[in-house]
Structure formats: C-alpha cells, structure tokens
C-alpha cells in the first residue's frame, strides 16, 4: 500500500523510538547476562569471580526448577483458559440489552483497577481464610468443614485470584470485538437456519478469533511474570507447590543472596518466555494477519 | 408455494408506530417491489415477513399456514441483504453451502447445487476465494447464490443493488429478472429507485409512512396514480404538479402532467413561459420552463433532439389533455 518513499520516511520517524527502546532493553539484559556468569553472592561482597556455566548448572539441576517450570505453565494455562472462556461468556451476556447495562459494564471492569497485592490480600484474608474468610463462614453455615484454600490447593487458589484480576480485561476486549460484529451477518445466519449455538460457533467465534489471540498474547506476557500474588499469599509454598519461575529467581537472588544464580535463572526465564512466545505466534499468530 | 398474505399487520418500536394496520397479498411467483421514500418502513415490512422482527399485531400467512410466530428459518424464505452479509471467514463455496449445511443436506447434493448456482451466477472461478477478495458485484452474486441453493418459497431482497455502480446495477437488475423468469419463485424486492421498481416489478407497492398508497402493475401506477403522492413518486423525471388558477380551469385543485406529455412550440400553445436550465441527456433534453401564472416551481418538459431555444427565451407549451391527471383537495385522483 505504502510507497517506497513513505516507507523510508516511516522508518526514519520511528527510529528514535526504536533505538531508545532497544537501549532500554539492552542495558539490563547485558548486565543480567554478565552477572549470570559470575560467582556473585551478596553475603561475600568483593569476591566476584568468573565461574562459567556453574550458575546455570546449579539452577537447572535444582529440583525446585522443574516444579517452578510446571507451576508457571499451569498458572499461565489455567488463567488463560478461565479468562478466555469466562470472558467470552461474560461478553455474550453483557452484549444483550438489559436494564442498567452501563453501570454493570463499568462494574465489570472494576477488578482490573485493584492492585495485585491488594486484591491478593483481600482474597487471602477476607475470602479464603478458613477461620475469618467468607468461604469458611459459608462452609460452617452449610455444616461443612472449612477448606484451607491456600495450604491445601495453593496453586489453584492463586490461579483463581489471578483469573479474577484478568477476567475483566478479557471480557472488555471480547465485548468490544463482539459489538463490532455486523448484525446482518447474524440475521443472515438466522435465516439460513443456524440456531443460537451454531451462530456462536460459525459466526461469532471466528469473528472473535483475533480478539482472543490478542487477549492470549497480552495475558501470557503478564502471566509469565506473576509475582505479587504469590508473595503476599503463599510465599511460594507449601514447599514449592506454588513457586513459579519469577518467584524462584526472587528466592535465589534475594532470599539466598545469590545474585549470580538469580541472574542465570533470569536468563533461563527469558529463553523460556521466548519459546512460549514463538510457540504462541506459530499457533495463533496466523489470526493476526487476516 | 410462496403465497404470502399480511392481515392487519402492525409494527411499533416502543411508542413509535412504524406500520399502521396493513393488508397485502403477494401471489405465488410474483415479483413484487416495495418502493417509497427513505424511512417509510420498507425494510421493516420486509423484516416482518422474514421473521427478523416480531409483528405488534396482525397475522402473516405463508401458503395459508400461520407464520406469525414461526422462527425465520422455518418460514422457507431467503433474504439478500443490502450489505450482502456474507460470512467473511468462509470461502465463497462455504458461504453458499452454509444454509444447506444447517439444513443437513447430503454432501453430494450440496455440491450439485453449489455447482449449478455458481454456473448460473458466473461464480465458478471464485468459489475458493474469501468474500474480501471479491468485487461488489461478485459479492452480490454470492449472496444471491446463498439464497438460491436453499430453494426457498420466496426471495426477499432489501435494496440489493444500492452499493453498486450504475452500469453494474443495470446488469444485476437484468440478472435478477432473468433469475425470476427461470425459477418462477415469488420475489419481494425493496428499493427506493423507481427505475428498478418500474422495470422489474410485476406489482409495485408504494408505501408512505407505513401506509400502502397504491398497489398495481408499473403501467397502472404510471397511467392512473391514485393520488398526488404516487403520481409524483412514479415516473422520472417527476410529474409536474400545477395548482391555482390553471388547475381550476380543469375543475381540479391541482393537475399533474408528465414531462413527456407536453408539446413544445416556439410560436403558439396553451401555456407560455420562459426557458430556464436545460438538461441534455443525448436522446432527450429536459427543459425547465418557468410558466407564467403557474407558481414558482418550474415545469419540466421533455423535448427530443436539440430544440433551438436558449436560456431566457419565450416558449409555448400544450399539455396532452388525454394524459392529464386531476386531483382534488385531498390529493386524490378525480
Ligand atoms: N429498531 C428500531 N427502533 C426504532 N425505530 C426503528 C427501528 N428500525 C426502524 N425504525 C424506524 O422505523 C421507520 C422505518 O424504517 P425502515 O428501516 O423500515 O425504513 P426504510 O423504508 O427501509 O428506509 P430506507 O429506504 O432509508 O432504507 C424509520 O422511521 C425508522 O426510524
Ligand atoms: Mg431500508
């Protein structure tokens, strides 16, 4: 579409921004890389020395690493599943005309404005606490044993909390996508004999494919680095039951004062994130071209 | 097969009453055109028949069976929308196959019908493209193809040609008429283009504010419009309406005379006036004449070839009294 001239101009115009972003990224990245090859422990300042791949070997052979890797993938996958499916259903619901639509739509976005630490604390203390939490009270009232969510199903609980935070985002994006669907297409499908489920499957879902792709890509980026919710609820425990990669790196570098090991973990996390990104792009990125 | 009857049908959106009680019968195999000015309720009426809107009261019967509360899919009608409403993520083939897939038509039968529709509509080379890769006229044909393969009782068209350019519109118009002749299925066609209405219809329904002003064949409406509204709506350019002294000499509140029914002369005639703007179309020329003592509205007069008159010249007009329409104070034909 664009002429050669306008493309050249465009490149020139965006180059300062690209250079700035690149510098912004390159400096911390190269420092992390550098640290990851040092024996650098905060308890022994001034003793830094080059150790080659030792940090990587230690990090990768740490049994906590595989637990953290699995947890990270479960966390990302679980939250994506819940938010995409839940978000689609909510968007379908909110797209119907009903009384008080405006207010309800604003209320639905509300969780997104609550800080992760705050929402995690609220969930931990007001809902999931077996003694004081609302769920505990509800269980009592039903004559059941209160369930201690955070120690008996720590990862599931965190998935629940994070999903609650991200559901509004998914809902909002999917709702706007749904509203941009040409009503005549739905009417045509209705006349063609498609029932509600078929209209959803054949018309709405393909229309939503791009929006779903965007939701998955953006959320994955943020979900790979979930940290605050784990810190304030379970501290990664019990054991490593709710430790993800980000939290493992935090433990390594700041709880065990091993900056070198933490940096090695960071580099591994970057590589893994890129693998996930390539995988995602391959799988669903096609939708973005159309 | 395909006889549609509306019985005292009304439609209101909240407080607004769009269709007052309306009766209409559409015979099997007829090509019926709804015309009327914008916002008069043509689309609403079509959507009521299609079942995309619920009637507020009254009854719709298709082939004698009460269809008032039937869902759209069970009415056996196919609709072609103004925006075509093709499914953008499906190929042309899948688009056309969609209604058959929903109806559970066997695969080989589907293929047979797609092939014959594609052949009839010149779409064979485009079957594997997406709608986004087609021109407007091709998209329109896909939409028609999707309607044909259902083998419906009746086709409903809502201004299907209004997004096309003039030349293509004439072509598609002929194709749709061709289709009607070969399928002999009832077709209901909405347009506000009165040329389309005149050329295509077996029967024209003229609507104004949800009311049926007149129903009849194109020539009936042209020759004997029931009132001033129909008189000025049908025919192009519009009929001249003259009020006041001149009309009174014919014993009417107003008289109407079409541009093609006025004889022109430079030296003698019944009325006289001054030549205004002339529109040259090649075969015809439409001259706007400011008639003396005939109000401020210029009269439009058709003359053929080149009439040797210039802007500001004096000119004489003689109406063909046989073809003069007289209307009373309510605008009804006398
Ligand atoms: N969903 C709706 N809610 C309220 N009013 C409506 C609705 N749909 C149509 N109307 C009103 O009903 C009237 C008839 O609309 P309709 O679409 O049938 O007009 P139309 O004859 O098809 O006009 P056009 O030639 O511009 O397409 C209009 O005044 C319109 O404002
Ligand atoms: Mg309309």
Image (tube, rainbow, N blue to C red):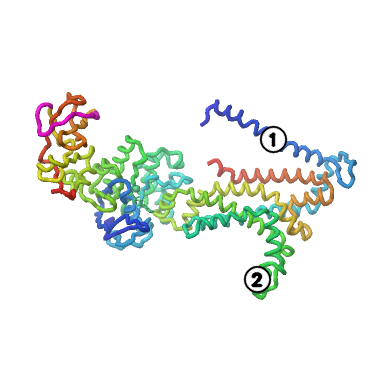
Q: What percent of the width, then of the height, locates residue A174? A: 54, 51
State whether the magenta stretch is mostly helix, strand or loop.
strand
Chain letter of mark 2 equals A
Which residue is tagged 2?
A138
The reply to whether residue A80 is in sight is: no
Q: What percent of the width, then of the height, locates residue B139? A: 40, 42
- Asked which quadrant contains residue A136, the reply is bottom right
- Which one is nearer the viewer's eye here, B228 or A68? B228
B310 shown above or below A43? above
Mark 1 packing: few (<14 Cα in 10 Å), some, or many (20+)?
A: few
Chain letter of mark 1 equals A
Marks 1 and 2, Cα distance to the nearest angstrom?
Answer: 52 Å
In the image, is B240 to the left or to the right of A83?
Answer: left
Q: What percent of the width, then of the height, locates residue A185? A: 43, 49
The reply to whether residue A136 is in sight is: yes
Name the outermost residue toward the bottom.
Answer: A143
A199 shown above or below A289? below
- Sequence-wise, which precedes: disc 1 or disc 2? 1
Q: What percent of the width, then of the height, locates residue A122? A: 68, 60
- Asked which quadrant contains residue B135, the reply is top left
Q: Which residue: 19% across, 32% down?
A: B289
- Tell me where the magenta segment starts and ends, as one range: B266-281
Q: Which residue: 65% across, 34% down?
A: A17
> Is residue B276 in the magenta section?
yes
Which residue is tagged 1?
A22
Q: Which residue: 72% across, 52% down?
A: A227
In the image, is A250 to the left or to the right of B227?
Answer: right
């Amino acid at each position: 579409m664009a002429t050669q001239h306008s493309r050249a101009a465009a490149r020139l115009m965006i180059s300062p921004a690209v250079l700035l972003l690149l510098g912004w990224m390159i400096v911390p990245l190269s420092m992390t890389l550098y640290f990851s090859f040092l024996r650098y422990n905060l308890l022994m300042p001034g003793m830094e020395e080059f150790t080659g791949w030792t940090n990587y070997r230690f990090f990768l052979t740490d049994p906590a690493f595989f637990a953290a890797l699995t947890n990270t993938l479960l966390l990302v996958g679980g939250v994506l599943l819940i938010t995409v499916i839940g978000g689609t259903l909510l968007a379908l619901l909110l797209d119907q005309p009903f009384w008080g639509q405006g207010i309800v739509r604003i209320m639905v976005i509300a969780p997104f404005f609550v800080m992760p630490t705050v929402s995690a604390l609220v969930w931990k203390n007001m809902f999931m606490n077996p003694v004081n939490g609302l769920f505990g009270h509800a269980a009592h009232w039903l004559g059941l044993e209160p369930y201690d969510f955070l120690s008996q199903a720590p990862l599931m609980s965190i998935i629940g909390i994070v999903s609650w935070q991200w559901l509004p985002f998914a809902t909002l994006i999917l709702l706007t996508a749904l509203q941009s669907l040409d009503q005549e297409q739905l009417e045509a499908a209705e006349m063609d004999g498609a029932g509600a489920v078929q209209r959803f499957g054949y018309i709405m879902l393909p229309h939503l494919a791009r929006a779903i792709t965007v939701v998955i890509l953006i959320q994955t980026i943020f979900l790979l680095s979930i940290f605050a919710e784990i810190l304030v609820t379970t501290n990664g425990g019990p054991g490593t039951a709710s430790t993800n990669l980000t939290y493992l790196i935090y433990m390594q570098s700041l709880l065990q004062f091993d900056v070198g090991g933490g940096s090695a973990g960071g580099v591994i996390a970057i590589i893994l994130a890129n693998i996930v990104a390539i995988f995602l792009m391959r799988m669903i990125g096609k939708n973005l071209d159309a | 097969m395909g006889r549609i009857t509306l019985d005292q049908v009304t439609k209101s959106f909240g407080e607004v009453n769009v269709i007052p009680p309306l009766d209409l019968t559409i015979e099997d195999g007829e090509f019926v055109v709804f015309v009327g000015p914008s916002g008069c309720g043509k689309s609403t009426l079509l959507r009521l028949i299609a079942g995309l809107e619920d009637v507020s009261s009254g009854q719709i019967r298709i082939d004698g069976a009460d269809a008032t509360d039937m869902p759209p899919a069970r009415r056996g009608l196919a609709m072609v929308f103004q925006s075509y409403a093709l499914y953008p993520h499906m190929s042309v083939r899948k688009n056309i196959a969609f209604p058959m897939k929903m109806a559970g038509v066997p695969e080989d039968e589907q293929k047979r019908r797609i092939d014959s529709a594609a052949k009839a509509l010149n779409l064979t080379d485009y079957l594997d493209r997406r709608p986004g890769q087609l021109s407007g006229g091709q998209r329109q044909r896909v939409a028609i193809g999707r309607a044909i393969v259902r083998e419906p009782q009746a086709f409903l068209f809502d201004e299907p040609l209004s997004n096309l350019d003039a030349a293509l519109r004439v072509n598609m118009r002929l194709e749709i008429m061709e289709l009607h002749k070969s399928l002999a299925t009832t077709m209901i066609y909405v347009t506000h283009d009165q040329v389309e209405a005149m050329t295509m219809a077996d029967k024209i329904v003229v609507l104004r504010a949800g009311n049926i002003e007149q129903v009849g064949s194109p020539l009936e409406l042209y020759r004997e419009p029931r009132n001033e509204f129909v008189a000025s709506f049908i025919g192009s350019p519009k009929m001249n309406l003259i009020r006041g002294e001149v009309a009174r000499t014919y014993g009417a509140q107003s008289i109407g005379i079409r541009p093609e029914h006025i004889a022109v002369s430079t030296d003698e005639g019944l009325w006289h006036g001054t030549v205004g703007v002339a529109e040259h179309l090649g075969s015809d020329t439409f001259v706007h004449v400011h008639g003396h003592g005939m109000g401020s509205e210029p009269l439009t007069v058709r003359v053929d070839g080149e009439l040797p008159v210039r802007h500001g010249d004096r000119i004489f007009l003689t109406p063909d009294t046989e073809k003069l329409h007289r209307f009373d104070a309510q605008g009804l034909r006398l």
